[in-house]
Image: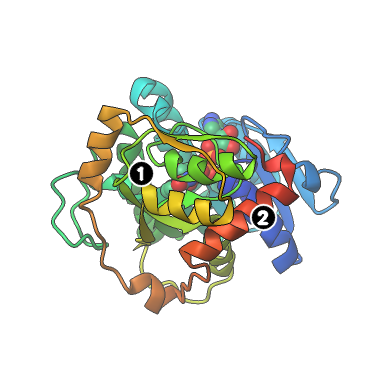
Amino acid sequence: MTIAIIGGTGFIGSFLAKALLEATDENLLLMDYYINEKRVKSLKGNPRVSIIKSDVSNRAEVFSHVGKAENISTLYHFGSLMPPLTESELTNAFNINIQGTFNILECAREFNISHVIYSSSGAIYGPGVELPVTERSYRDPWTMYGVGKVCSEVLGTFYHRRKGVKFTSIRFPALIGPGRTGKGMTIFANNIIQYPAQGEKAICNVEEDIAVPVIYIKDSTKFLVSLHNHEHIPENTYNIDGVWMKAEELAELVRNEIPDVIIEYDPDPELTFMLRSWSMMKGESDAVFNDLNYSPSFSPEEMVKDFIAEVRANPEYII
Ligand SMILES: NC(=O)c1ccc[n+]([C@@H]2O[C@H](COP(=O)([O-])OP(=O)(O)OC[C@H]3O[C@@H](n4cnc5c(N)ncnc54)[C@H](O)[C@@H]3O)[C@@H](O)[C@H]2O)c1
């Protein structure tokens, strides 16, 4: 059997690929359009791993590359245009993030892929969401990125109900860990740890008291592995709220590990404004714990310590 990961050389996909290789005896098909060679260096040459360049927005390519691979048990769909590009490149955002999910679901239907697991986000909610936020809260995104997430979830739920494709969407908080790249709204939480771990100064582009919910990449990876072959997943969508951390709280944890670190603040007013409205969106959801046995094992202190140690031990993580 084969496990497919779309966006398989991305931040989440590459961590998951390494974990699945250890946790299962299945082959892996990593499909990506912008293959990140550095992240998958250790997987190259492994006879259980195929890495294929393919565009998720191109139905023919998806059908030929994913459909051609025999016996796909689980397909993780992480292929995405990421913010802020989603907000300026609307056509690309539609083609990759909405048409792309449609292509994946059609391919799953056509080739009997048992389970599609999708990574959604809190961006599906808007500033007016009623608190506390739960799975049942009204989805009212204000960004094209969030629109893509809502459309993908709705499509996936339809394919689950009517077309026999098991679909699970996990709405992740900010994932942080070695080697996350990009310019997304929550990247500050990563950079504040990653740069000092590399021996560099960190410049934080939000105010000190801005908080975001975070989850460590190792905890999310462990959880994603557990979803493969999960016997009974009662719902199509689950929220993970994460641990709410202020920029300065993360900075303090980094200072505990690297006393001479330099962390400066140079806040971007618009980003700070957007994150302030998000900081109201405290979640309340036990479903992911009760239904799916989600159990994060890293405290914030352990996360920062482990993150720094990983960067130092594996320089290939360097952004
Ligand atoms: N990182 C986070 O904090 C976070 C939080 C919530 C949800 N997510 C979601 O998780 C998924 C993966 O995020 P990530 O952090 O690993 O980001 P990432 O940018 O590292 O990975 C996305 C991958 O998609 C690939 N991709 C882009 N266009 C493609 C195309 N046309 N065809 C095929 N592949 C294409 C990229 O090359 C990249 O490898 C995304 O859907 C993202 O929205 C991420």
Residue 79, disc: none
- Which amino acid, by three-letter code, is at mark 1? Lys
Residue 149, disc: 1
Q: Quadrant of residue 98?
A: top left
Q: Residues within 10 Å of mark 2 (few under 14, many from 20)?
A: some
- Which amino acid, by three-letter code, is at mark 2? Ala
Question: Judging from the image, what secondary structure is the residue with disc 2 in?
Answer: helix
Label 1 beta carbon within 8 A of ligand 1: yes
> What is the quadrant of the C terminus in the image?
top right
* Residue 253 in the image, given as x and y percentages of width and height: 48, 56
Q: Quadrant of residue 130?
A: bottom left
Q: Is residue 62 visible?
A: yes
**Seen in the image, is 102 located left or right of residue 258?**
left
* Residue 286 in the image, given as x and y percentages of width and height: 32, 73
**Seen in the image, is 285 located left or right of residue 318?**
left
Task: Please name the residue shown 56% across and 69% down the image.
Answer: 226
Q: Nearer the viewer, residue 245 or 120?
A: 245
